[in-house]
Amino acid sequence: MTLVAGVDSSTQSCKVVILDAGTGTLVREGRAAHPDGTEVHLDHWWQALSAALDDAGGLADVSALSVGGQQHGMVLLDHAGDVVRPALLWNDTRSAGAAAALTDEVGAEDFARRTGLVPVASFTITKVRWVRDHEPDLADRVAAVALPHDWLTWRLRGYGPAASSPLGPDLEQLTTDRSDASGTGYWSPSAGEYDLDLFKLAFGRDAREATGNAGPGEPGTVVLPRVLGPGDSAGGIHPGCFGPGTAELAGSAGSGHRILLGAGAGDNAAAALGLGAQPGDMVVSVGTSGTVFSVASRAVADPSGTVAGFADASGEYLPIAVTLNAARVLSSVAGILGVDFDELARLALGAEPGAGGVVLVPYFEGERTPNLPHAKASFHGLSIASSTRSNLARAAIEGMLCGLSGGLEALRAQGGAATRLLLIGGAVQNPAVQAIAAQVFDLPVVVPSPGEYVARGAAVQAAWANLGSRPDWPVAVDAAPAPDFHRAIRQNYLRASSRVDPGN
């Protein structure tokens, strides 16, 4: 039996799955937590990856591994391979002003045509502009800009700071893939290459793609990771990458066993691979953020910025709409009500669809779709009669799902075919979320069995690189709630959200 491993280095934690490459059957798994916050030092990711691999029993019997990671996180490195500053994550909104400035300078239509997206605070290009404007001394030190999965793959290959890596700080060895590169705001899915003029506009310095050859490049020019294709390998894991005494995590140096590294992917593209998503499938993921995406055969350019026209990890495209507010909406309202998730579900299912007219617009952390980074959450339609615990609980779930339904409609407006909806993420195991999803969405809802689909998709990449062809693993289904569409739920939500104060 050939084993492959997939990693999901997400906002909240690092997960590792080890699967049978022939069938996709889970053999073992591990995880470790990441710190909270919207910026994090990269050492925490490296320590969590080591701990998660240890929890999964190491890699001594594994043939290949690939890393899926949270998109857009800004990783800045200097010439010595050291981290210049903590990474700004996708959910750090301090660069909202930079996003607006870049849009004004280029124009929304031109930005969408060139990169498939219009800048919002989530995207990497806005974060490098923010550093240029607010931390110029740090910006002067930057020799390379990468993404979370790029950095982890680089470190696994043995590269990094001279004092703590076997092969040293060779920035020319940085790699990424088309799915993650397409979320930066300076890579074109349609052209398949970096838009270096946009990067220079944002950061004020020239950049170029890494060569993959050993040695220093042009002084003063920022290195961007080399973009690998679907099924490509980034190289092999260096057995000493985790330091002395941890060879079992990365293979034994004396055994001759080489663990191949896949290209890696952004988290949503990896989830699409893990689900085996096909044209016509709309995937709604309810995690820290909420996402709606589909697999498409053509690049999408939406000048409104609602849909980002990313590339996927299979050679196709991945139009996507993202909300900042998803599972934490439920935990926030559960906290207000003083209940756990089971009791939140019981309360919600005890209310009628539409929650007696109570609507939650769930912008607890600002919002990306629509682009309202400074907005706040608000309840609407409260009266003496409607202000019940059950209505508040149902309004929380309806509001979260209605925010995602706006993304679904935006994808349809871009020509996306929609025949069924795949509902994934930890929060969708809540029975109220499943039942209410069938009332909010006007598509058949399918809930795949719980699983780490980002890590599973990374494992697909690992098997693809190792075996030479993409595996076709079956995906089990946990639930398929009966269709029960209520148009009024979303109509009430749209009326309430139109009255939201955008903030300052």
Image (cartoon, rainbow, N blue to C red):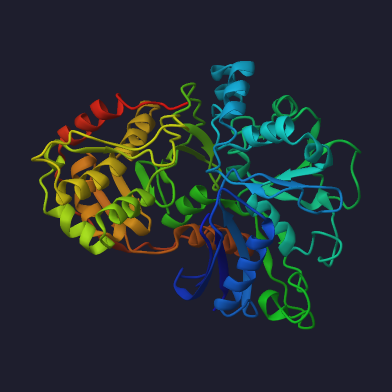
Residue drawn at the location 42% of the way across and 54% of the way down:
276
Which residue is at the front of the view, 121 or 406?
121
Residue at the outermost front position: 384
User: Is 285 rendered above or below residue 198?
Assistant: below
Residue 245 visible from this viewpoint: yes
User: Is 201 rendered above or below residue 455?
Assistant: above
Whole-percent x, y for residue 491 in the image = 20, 29
User: Is 440 rendered above or below residue 80?
Assistant: above
The N terminus sits in image quarter: bottom right
Counting the numbered discs, the total is 0
User: Is 361 rendered above or below residue 34?
Assistant: above
Residue drawn at the location 27% of the way across and 63% of the way down:
340
Q: State which quadrant residue 469 falls in.
A: bottom right
Residue drawn at the location 58% of the way across and 51% of the way down:
265
Residue at the outermost left position: 385
Whole-percent x, y for residue 168 in the image = 86, 60
Q: Is residue 332 left or right of residue 496?
A: right
Whole-percent x, y for residue 475 in the image = 37, 62
Whole-percent x, y for residue 110 in the image = 59, 18
Residue drawn at the location 69% of the way across and 26% of the way down:
198
Residue 482 visible from this viewpoint: no
Q: State which quadrant residue 72 falls in.
A: top right
Which residue is at the front of the view, 83 or 60?
83
